[in-house]
């Protein structure tokens, strides 16, 4: 390929569009392959190559359902934490403004699984 300084603006745009389209296609294929591998791993299958082993990484996120939070702690507390995350609610519990046990009972843990490639050591 020519040096970028040697290309016209139209040629730069053409190259950019080609790269973008190629990347989008590759990302779509990667996502589809990842979904198929993830589904297989969830059924107990194992996948590995000479260099990598596929694994599922589980992440958990704690959330508090707004309606139950408001019923338990009232409108003012719900409004105070509604636009903030769980750290704010936990800070209020730590400060004694909310009952920590009630807050724990309200918590909903959301799990997500991500496909990760673990390098194999020799």
Image (cartoon, rainbow, N blue to C red):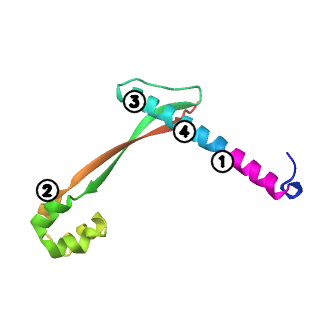
Label 2 to label 1, Cα distance in Å?
Answer: 47 Å
Quick check: can you spot residue 102?
Answer: yes
Extreme residue in the front direction: 10
Give the residue number, with chain letter if any, for mark 3.
39
- Based on the displayed image, in which of its 4 quarters is residue 43 positioned? top left
**Among numbered discs 2 and 4, the one appearing first in the sequence:** 4
Could you tell me which residue is drawn at 24 percent across and 75 percent down?
Answer: 80
Q: Is residue 6 above or below residue 33?
A: below
Q: Secondary structure at mark 4?
A: helix
Q: Secondary structure at mark 3?
A: helix
- Which residue is labeled 2 in the image? 105
Front in this rendered view, residue 76 or 95: 76
Where residue 36 sits: x, y (%)?
A: 45, 29
Q: Earlier in the sequence, mark 2 or mark 1?
A: 1
Q: CA distance from mark 3 to mark 1?
A: 28 Å
Residue numbers of the magenta segment: 8-20
Give the residue number, with chain letter if any, for mark 4.
28
Task: Tell me the distance, in whole angstroms, between the alpha carbons under discs 2 and 4.
Answer: 40 Å
**In this rendering, is residue 106 above or below 19?**
below
């Amino acid at each position: 390929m020519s040096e970028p300084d040697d290309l016209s603006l139209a040629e730069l745009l053409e190259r950019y569009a080609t790269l973008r389209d190629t990347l989008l296609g590759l990302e779509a294929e990667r996502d589809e392959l990842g979904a198929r591998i993830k589904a297989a791993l969830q059924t107990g299958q194992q996948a590995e190559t000479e260099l990598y082993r596929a694994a599922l990484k589980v992440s958990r996120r704690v959330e508090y359902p707004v309606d139950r939070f408001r019923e338990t702690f009232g409108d003012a507390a719900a409004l105070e934490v509604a636009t903030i995350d769980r750290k704010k609610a936990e800070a209020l519990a730590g400060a004694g403004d909310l009952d920590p046990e009630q807050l724990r009972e309200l918590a909903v843990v959301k799990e997500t699984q991500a496909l990760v490639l673990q390098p194999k050591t020799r």
